Image: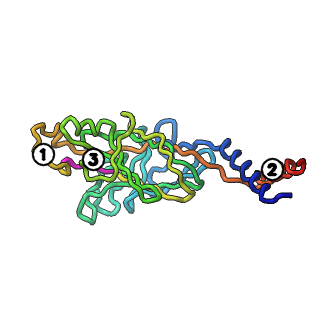
Amino acid sequence: MNCPKLIVLTLAAMSFTNCQSSEAASFLFGVGQIRNTITGLASAELESEGVKIFLQAGPSGSRFDDSDAQGLGINSINSPAGITDPDRTKLNFIAGHPSGTPVAESFAFSFNRPGILKDLLFDGVKDETLEYFSLEFPDGHVITMFDSEADFRLGIQGFSLTDLNVSHPIEFQTEDDDLTGIGYSFAAGEVFTFTYGEGSYDDVPGYRTNPNFPQFPNAVGDGARFQGVVVQIIPEPTIGLVMVAAFSACLWLGKR
């Protein structure tokens, strides 16, 4: 029997079966989905379609709050002592941190199986205050996600998101604050990190002195929520699958 040919046929059968059986796993926060199940936890584990997601709230001492129907937030009140959190049901800036400056809430997540990051869902990211979520991928690449009208807001006054001091600014594709069709492949255990932020009009050269003075010069962001993530899972080959593929290859080769 030709062993190399057997190996090739076995791997091909495994690859074909895996592609056919890949499935999407959704982790959604809000009404009718995951709600009020991880409130008060600093770290959490959830499961969907046999896939587990691991979540860690930040900064240190913060806890998740998924009690709101619009999505997931983070509660940083008194963690550490003296911290004030404007809204425990959102991700926002907290005050009273020992660093002496406002600190952004964040969270990290990973999965127990390899897959492809497909969609990210948010709620309440406002264009007039240039709110955003930055996402750091496992390979260190960072994108900064703004409301779908943010660039328009700056554009009518002669400026652009690229004028802001942020990494790789992009807009959500629709007014629903969602980013779909991402297509980033990840391995089991690789970590993604979300951080809330607000772009500053003061980062844009000449913005404050522009004749078309800012439409919202005194607006202050009030936070936003994370509604969920959808991933395409790549099934891992099983011993049974390998045996079936090998047996099929043996039968095929035996007839030659």
Q: Nearer the viewer, residue 43 or 189?
A: 189
Point out the residue furthest to the bottom here.
98
Q: Nearer the viewer, mark 3 or mark 1?
A: 3
C-alpha separation, residue under disc 2 versus residue under disc 3:
54 Å
Q: In the rendered structure, does residue 247 fall within the stretch colored magenta?
A: no
| Sequence-first tag of 2 and 3 | 3
Compared to residue 156, the image places residue 191 above or below, namely below
Q: Which residues are magenta?
A: 196-201
Identity of the amino acid at label 1?
A: Arg
Label drawn at residue 208: 1
Tell me residue 149's x, y (percent): 30, 36
| Left or right side of 226 for 94 | left
Number of other residues with Cα within 10 Å of mark 2, as a class: few under 14, some 14 to 19, many 20 or more:
some
List the residue tagged with mark 3.
162
Q: In the rendered structure, does residue 198 fall within the stretch colored magenta?
A: yes
List the residue tagged with mark 2.
244
